[in-house]
Amino acid sequence: MKPLLAGFGRELLDSLARVGSLNVMFYRTLRALFPPRYDREELFRQLHRIGVRSLPIVVLTALLVGVIMVLQSMTYVRKTGATGFVGAGAGLAVLSELGPSLIGLMFSGRVGANAAAELGNMVISEQVEALRALAIDPIRFLVAPRFIAIVTSLVLLTVVGDLCGLVGGAMACHWLLDIDWRTYLAGLMEVDLLDDFVVGLCKAAAFGGVISTVSSNYGLTVTGGAQGVGRAVNGCVVTTALGIFIADYVITWVWFQI
Amino acid sequence: MTAAHPVARTVGLAKAFGAHQVLAGVTLELSEGRCTFVAGPSGTGKSVLVRHLVGLLKPDAGEVWYKDLRVDVLDEEALLGLRRRCVYVFQHPTLFDSMTVTENVALVVKYHKGVKAAAAEGLARAQLDRMGLSRLAESRPPELPAGEQKLVSLARALALEPETLILDEPTTGLDPYAAFEIDAHVRRLKELGVTLLVISHDLQSIRRLADEVVFLFDRKVRYEGGVDGFFHSADPVLDQFVHARVEGEI
Amino acid sequence: MALLITIGQMLSLSLWALVRMRLGGREMLRQVYETGNRSLLFVGITMAFIGMIGVYELASTMEAVLPEYSTLGAATLQGLTREMGPIMAGLLLATRVGTGMAAEIGSMQVSDQVDAMKLSSVDPVELLVLPRLFATSVASLGLAAVGTTIAFFSGMCVAWLGFSILPDTFMSLRFVVTADLVMGICKALVFGFTVPLVSCACGFLATGGSEGVGRATTRAVVLSSFIVIVEDALITYIGEVLS
Ligand SMILES: Nc1ncnc2c1ncn2[C@@H]1O[C@H](COP(=O)(O)OP(=O)(O)OP(=O)(O)O)[C@@H](O)[C@H]1O
Ligand SMILES: [Mg+2]
């Protein structure tokens, strides 16, 4: 019992310390963004690397999410007989909820983990110290461009992903369920999707902030060689996943309040 | 000691990592326009000492000054200003692997001179040219031998046009010719009036270049003074170091 | 390609070990405990949030499509059992456990410890992968069950506090049938088996120092999450065809 409690206490303290340092990182990133003196080329390079190269995984994920949601709402439809629900349910779920969060999760793995590993390696090989010794602020040079690139890419990718999710749903109706895709579309049109689309994009922007902050923080605090990098990546994706769902809940809640 | 002003100095510097006391009461002065060598056995904390001078480490006790600036209390932002004037070149080459040599140098130029990318490249090339490194311009750091990586690191630091330069073991692990090349650059900088602090075990370099020598041993400064005194000291520890004797305290 | 080969090798070795019943029960139990224990808090918290989000969304959708909430609880439970419980647990497992395995095995690989094992004629797959493989399957099942329960109850709180739906109304099992339960269990087991398989393979293929470890870990989380989603779509479809 005692070691269990001690372990729990240690974990709790570690988590609190981590939350603190995440906030500091977020604050310093924001400070580095204004005035906008970040490196424009680095920004474009990051946008390309982060945005363009994540496109395939995002498209595939979104298609599958659309398929899954249509298949899933089928079971509900069969029970209640509300056929219109196929389009409405799947569409709403994809746009406002599963699209952003699952794309966010995949993006966190693809980009966040990568950033943590990259920054971690720069720390281990003292390249970050070297930046500081050359009077270059690592936050401004390394973190700020990533932050902008990650948030922008994730929002844009979510737009693409939403579309793919809806197309995936139509494809599932047509080929897997023998439902005319027009029925699906009609169901989709019945509800007001714009709101859900917008809230989805708000979520995507917030997730982008979470992914960037968490990955930079874990990356820049790596200690202890190759193992340390592995641990940092692991910690980074775990914290990001947690952060994504917390942010998701907060935004959903705020959204329904107004 | 000469009458020259101290540029950088530490007063009673102490630093420990956990239970491991690395420095205890180190007082050191760099005189303007002089070339000071810091020597000492491996692991005595030479690198740790000089990192305090540019604020990369904070002391547990003692003070660090750069001219009229108290370094150890500055925040990160203020330190950036200091590091523009007083540049530290790491012991291990810390070039950015993902960029070419030119881009490595251009990065510093771009960041500090506020010029456009193309102009920065031009300036970087000129800098490499001046140091006779134009052949390396398009290579990537991991492909280069250690000596050339160190030269490029030096070129990158010089792109800042510092008034004080700290070199951490610039010739360790290099073949004699590469070491000689580095020494030639140091000599040129000395002639330009740059204040220099060089960490080195290389007795040849010390003979060739040093104005002053500081010998660090067992957490403290063991010797501080001229080159002749260093080589002909009666102190058994210095004698052992200079003549590479097996028996002794080191 | 190399990844597929490695996965194939590991799979055949594991099945062979399964046939020969060489599973080292004690080590496996330890792994089950480790995996479950390490992920429990994370999965619990995350699933609680997922449950709350899900109910919020579902309730507002129902408001728009069929303006009443009587099926909310039943639909939530069914959705959680068949779909959200297992897939989220699978994704969280990929995140928590998969990357951990890739990082661990990757750092052993780049520091030549794996080769050292081979030289002392210990089979690294048998030593490192096997216990993890079966342990994670078991742990995945447990985590999906616990996660689903937590999500359901947190959703119930939201329904109660946010939409004034009494727990009595919410707590309804009437949509959940055996088929849903079977599907949930199948998914959890399959995810629990493939996540370590893919992640360990990524770890073994790590090359080149700390950068290699970083790459392997990143690759592990992307691939294993993606495969979880693919498998989920497949199993859901198979379930749909069968019903
Ligand atoms: N960040 C750190 N954390 C813990 N210990 C450290 C750290 N940096 C240095 N040390 C310890 O301080 C001691 C002095 O290190 P330092 O690198 O300054 O030695 P050095 O005199 O430069 O030796 P060398 O000639 O090998 O470069 C070493 O024993 C090292 O282990
Ligand atoms: Mg050193």
Image (tube, coloured by chain):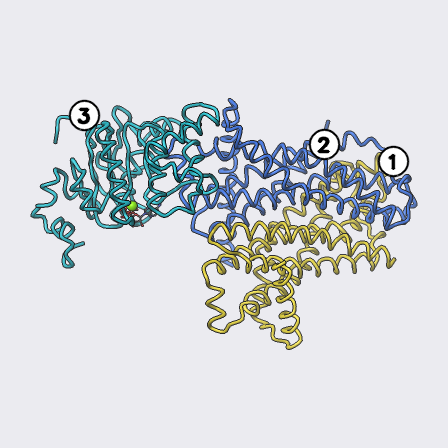
Chain colours: A blue, B cyan, C yellow
Q: Is residue C16 above or below residue A70?
A: below
Amino acid type at image mark 2: Val
Amino acid type at image mark 3: His
Q: Is residue B221 above or below residue C234?
A: above
Cβ atoms at labels 1 and 2 below 8 Å apart: no
Q: Label 3: chain?
A: B
Secondary structure of the residue carrying tag 3 is loop
Q: CA distance from mark 3 to mark 2?
A: 64 Å
Residue carrying label 1: C67
**Badge number at residue A199:** 2
Viewer-proximal residue among B124 and C138? B124
Residue carrying label 3: B5
Q: For residue A115, what is the image quadrant?
A: top right
Instruction: Kindly report which numbered mark, 3 or 1, lies closer to the viewer in this rendering.
Output: 3
Q: Residue at x 59, y 72 (%)?
A: C25
Q: Label 1: chain?
A: C
Q: For residue B148, what is the image quadrant?
A: top left
Amino acid type at image mark 1: Pro
Q: CA distance from mark 3 to mark 1?
A: 84 Å
Whether residue A127 is visible, yes or no, is: yes
Q: Residue at x 90, y 39 (%)?
A: A182
